[in-house]
Image (spheres, rainbow, N blue to C red):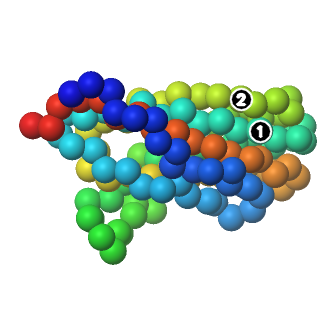
Amino acid sequence: MAWGSKTQIATALSVAGTELFSDSFTLNPAENANIQIIGNSSGTTDDLIISLYTTLDESTENWDTVPLFSQELDCTDGNDNDITLLVTGVYKARLGFARTGTTDTITTNAYIRKDGVNL
């Protein structure tokens, strides 16, 4: 299978307090997801915490309460800051976004492009 189309899974989320979530995505066996996250803060204090949560459910999801992994993105310079993650080996997932402090609002976008073979 060739690379799939680029799809936006989080659109201008205003990460300011409670953790916000992207749209979920499902991977077929042997599929990979290349995910790009862009965080922008006009402030100089808080960073963006990116977490990956998974579920085995197709509908009425029971999402993990502890993320499979978390990554911190420095958003203290007031510019767009990008990070790319590679996800594989999970059935269904979504990203969670939170800030490290209580000062800044971080505008967050995320995009996904899948690649691999449906076994």
* Residue 67 visible in rendering: no
Q: Secondary structure at mark 2?
A: strand
Q: Which residue is mark 2?
A: 81
Residue type at mark 1? Asn
Circle on res. 40: 1
List x then y, in percent, for residue 88: 31, 35
Q: Residue at x 35, y 69 (%)?
A: 62
Above-or-below relation of 43 to 12: above
**CB of mark 1 within 8 Å of CB of mark 2?**
yes
Residue type at mark 2? Asn
Above-or-below relation of 109 to 20: above
Q: Badge 2, how many Cα within 10 Å: few under 14, some, many 20+?
A: some
Residue farthest to the top? 2
Q: Residue at x 59, y 28 (%)?
A: 83
Q: Badge 1, how many Cα within 10 Å: few under 14, some, many 20+?
A: many
Please state the total of marks drawn on the protein image. Answer: 2
* Residue 119 visible in rendering: yes
Q: Relative to residue 58, is residue 50 drawn left or right?
A: right
Q: Secondary structure at mark 1?
A: strand
Above-or-below relation of 62 to 108: below
Above-or-below relation of 27 to 74: below
List x then y, in percent, for residue 101: 80, 50
Residue farthest to the left? 119
List x then y, in percent, for residue 24: 42, 55
- Cα distance, mark 1 to mark 2? 6 Å
Residue farthest to the bottom? 60
Camera-nearest residue between 33 and 113: 113
List x then y, in percent, for residue 3: 33, 27
Camera-nearest residue between 17 and 31: 31
The image quadrant where one finds the C terminus is top left
Using the rendered view, name the quadrant where residue 41 is placed: top right
Using the rendered view, name the quadrant where residue 33 is placed: top left
